[in-house]
Structures are given as C-alpha cells and as structure tokens.
Amino acid sequence: MTNKIFSNNKWFFEDDVPYDPGTTQIGLKIKKKLYSGKSSYQRIDFYDTYAFGKILVLDGILQTSEKDEFVYHEMLCHTPLFLHKNPKKVLIIGGGDGGALEETLKHKVEEVVMVEIDKKVVDLSKKYLPSISKNAFRDKRTKLIIGDGKAFIEKNTNAFDVIILDLSDPDGPAKELISLIFYKNVKKCLKKDGVISIQSGSFSVQPKLVSTIYNRIKKVFPFYEIHKAVVEAYQAGEYSFTIGAKENINKITKAQLEKRFKKNNLKLNYYSPDMHFASKVLPKYIKDIITS
Ligand code: SAM
C-alpha cells in the first residue's frame, strides 16, 4: 500500500495485513522497544506501548496485547470448550504467546497438546509477556510440540475433543491453514462429538477472509456458528470467531450452558453464558458478509 507510514522508535504502525485494504492506519505510541529480531519463519518484535501495554508483533502485524488479550483468548477458547459437553483432550495449533493455553487449562481437561511452529515466539513470549501465559507452559497437562500444525493434523485422526486454531494471519507460516483440505483434515482429527474454533478475521477490515473461512467451515462441518467481539488492539472493529462441530451445538440452551459454566466455576473477565449467546446475534450487514 503506498503512502504507508512505517514504524519508528516512537510509533508502531502495522504492516500490510492479509485481506485488509490497508486504508486505515492507527499508530501506537511506544514506551519502549523490548526486542526486535528474526526467526527462520518470521520477524518478531515486542514493544511496551502506552495504550495496550506490552505487545507481540509478527511480520509487522500485532498478535496480542497485555491490555485486551483476555477478550480474544476467552472468546476463542471458552466458546468451543463450553459447547463440548465434557472436553478432556484439546489441541491448540499456533498460540505461541501461551494465552489460549492458559485459558484452556482453566477447564478440567486431562491434556492440552499445543503445536507451535516457532520456538522463538514461545521462548520470547515467556520472557516479555509472562502475564499472558502465566504458568501454562509449566502445567503437567501441557504437551508443547514445536512443529507445523498442518503436518501434525495430517498425521492424527479421531484424537481430540476440541481443536483451537490460534494462528497468525493467513500469510507466511500460516498461509495454507485456511484451506478446505486443511479443515477436512482437522475434522478427521476430532472425535465423533468434536468442536473446532478459529479466529476468522475482522468483519470490518477483512470481510472476504471472514466469509471465506465461514463458508469453508459450513462445507466441512454439519453444525457451525460465528461469534463476534471487539479486540481493541487489533484496530479492526468487530472480530470473528468461527465454530464448527460434528454434533448439534445449535440446540444447546442457555440453561445447559449456565449449568456447565457453574460446574466449572471459572473466574473470567469477558466470556459468560450471556456473552456466548449475545456474541452470536448478528446484524443484517454481517449476515450479508458471511453469506456473500
Ligand atoms: N492472536 C493472534 C492473531 O489472531 O493474529 C495469533 C497469535 S499466535 C502468536 C499465532 C501463532 O501461530 C504464532 O506464534 C505463529 O508462529 C503460529 N503459526 C503460524 N503458522 C503456523 C503453523 N503452520 N503451525 C503452527 N503454528 C503456526
């Protein structure tokens, strides 16, 4: 995108985001540049900012912030985990900052396998963003595998109750992990009552990405729904979380969800049975986006 403003030592501006026309740019005032380097997969930057605290940036795109990671991670993880009647084995693909892992381990799960392609993201996030992962990487239920999520999915079948795709935007190492064949393989990797959750982009700046992912999930899974929430740090208006399931999640009542929520007794700041149902009420213009 021409006329693009580039980050400097005072302000952070996002680079081109896939599926985003890049016609809006919001700068974050930098308090301190914490780390800047490369791995064999991507550029990695950590900044401390005035507005969102410490942030992780991959290939110039903001991934998570201390201030509002809970909105994103609670919606991405608790939505599928409460839709499943009793999740025991969970798979997270990506999620290098450890936020999705930390939220998932709040449930009475037996094992959480996390497949992250870039060890450097995990090691540096432990150092610069410990408030996000807390003790999750040290939990004995955590099985961290450094590797390509696509290859892992192709090698496993009928293994997981819930699969959470906490991937960077579909470019670079995550490029092929929104394809129809990938979602078909993810479905094979789930047990018979399995549920999948995907961060599927922004309704306002990436409508084409949202409809692409949603319509591919619709093709692969008999039951599906989409939830929304504003993740301020993403500067992208309302963000979408697409859910696919092998069993009928659409018939789950609020009373049933409240019973599961009470039984787990989790202390959460965003997700709740009320927010679960409120976040899937869609205005017409969004229904038009996902049916386009
Ligand atoms: N919340 C962020 C977002 O919505 O953009 C995602 C955060 S998380 C840090 C994204 C992670 O996906 C990164 O650590 C990246 O290394 C990982 N990743 C990208 N492609 C991958 C692949 N093929 N297999 C496993 N992990 C991958």
Image (cartoon, rainbow, N blue to C red):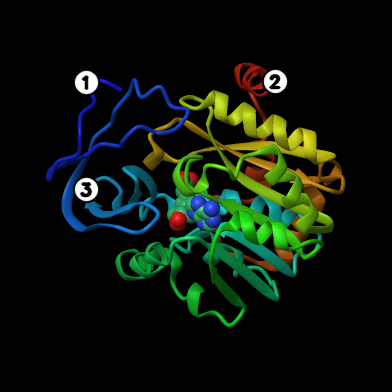
36 vs 273, nearest the viewer: 36
Residue 222, placed above or below residue 190: above
Mark 1 or 2, nearer chain start: 1
Alpha-carbon neighbours of circle 1 within 10 Å: few (<14), some, or many (≥20)? few
Residue at left offset 62%, top offset 78%: 141
Furthest residue to the left?
9
Residue wearing tag 1: 3
Residue wearing tag 3: 50
Say left or right for 121 vs 2.
right
The x and y percentages for residue 80 are: 70, 52
Q: CA distance from mark 1 to mark 3?
A: 25 Å
- Tell me the kind of residue under disc 1: Asn
Q: Report helix, strand or loop for mark 2.
A: loop
Residue 273, placed above or below residue 24: below
Residue wearing tag 2: 291
Residue at left offset 79%, top offset 39%: 220
Quarter of the image where the C terminus is located:
top right
